[in-house]
Image: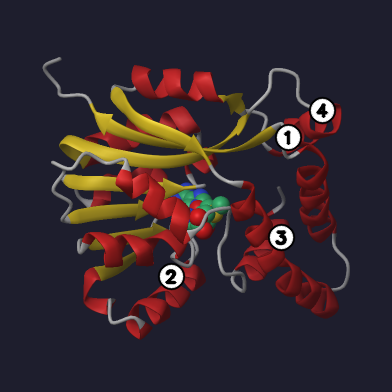
Amino acid sequence: MEADDLTLLFEVFENTPRQGPGSVETTRRALRLLPDSLRVERVLDLGCGTGGSTIVLAEDTGAHVTAVDIHPPFLATLRARAEERGLADRITTVAADMANATSLGAGFDLIWAEGSAYSIGFENALRRWRPLLRPAGCLVVTELVWFVAEPAERARAFFAGEYPDMRDEATRIGQARSARYDLLGSFRLPADDWHAYYAGLEAPLRDAISRRGEREIYAATRLERAIYEACGDDYGYLCLVLQAVAAST
Ligand SMILES: C[S@@+](CC[C@H](N)C(=O)[O-])C[C@H]1O[C@@H](n2cnc3c(N)ncnc32)[C@H](O)[C@@H]1O
């Protein structure tokens, strides 16, 4: 994607409630799959966007959350949201590349990555992030996957361009195990999360078009939605709740 397209896209997403499919209910569902014995005091939310998950994590776990994103304006919105909810002292925002996350420290109890791992490669992300966890720490990641072996041609062709490394559920689970995580649980994000995401995109997209004129990247965003509406049974987000396997096993 041209840098210019990326700038245009960031501009749209600065004004959306979330930057990818997800919801408060989905974040909570994943939290419920963590072991009761897991003490959660330090959380790292990678690719946090404007903090759809960060706020829930801080509120529900009582932990300190380090929220990381490469796009500083998203973090400014997150800081304002944290302030409004009285969470400013428990959320630290860091503008950084999550591919080089070692500078963020180590010994985290929990790493959270909703819809963001793909941007540095799913397997690469799982391997790079593991050393940041304390022993038996957990990782929750959502990832776009194929639900069927033979997806509709329209969807297949679209994602061949947008996400050529998209895989099926079993492959991602296998990769997580190879990267030395145990699978504690998994579920597919509900269709409601997608509908809410696309509904939240409508006004910012209209606004962007009225300011900037029609652009290819806006058309691609509308096409993505049309493909979801036509072929959304063939693919979606998988949430994986993982735990680092102890070093000696
Ligand atoms: C699909 S959005 C998901 C945002 C948020 N987790 C949510 O569910 O609403 C992916 C996010 O990852 C961020 N991102 C992409 N590549 C990144 C990188 N290398 N380092 C840090 N953040 C990155 C983007 O800026 C964006 O906010």
> Where in the figure is residue 170, as x and y percent of width and height?
51, 19
Q: Residue at x 36, y 63 (%)?
A: 56
**Which of disc 4 and disc 3 is earlier in sequence?**
3
The answer for how far apart the CA atoms under marks 1 and 3 are is 21 Å
Q: Which mark, residue 249?
A: none
**Residue highlighted by disc 1:** 159
Direction from residue 118 to residue 243 in the image, left or right: left
**Residue highlighted by disc 3:** 4
Q: Which mark, residue 75?
A: 2
> Where in the figure is residue 114, as x and y percent of width and height?
46, 49
The answer for how far apart the CA atoms under marks 1 and 4 are is 11 Å
The answer for how far apart the CA atoms under marks 2 and 1 are is 28 Å
Estimate how packed mark 2 is, as few (under 14), some (14 to 19) or many (20 or more) residues with alpha carbons within 10 Å: many
Q: Nearer the viewer, mark 1 or mark 4?
A: 4
Q: Nearer the viewer, mark 3 or mark 2?
A: 2
> Where in the figure is residue 94, as x and y percent of width and height?
34, 63
The answer for how far apart the CA atoms under marks 3 and 2 are is 21 Å
| Circle 4 SS class | loop
**Residue highlighted by disc 4:** 152
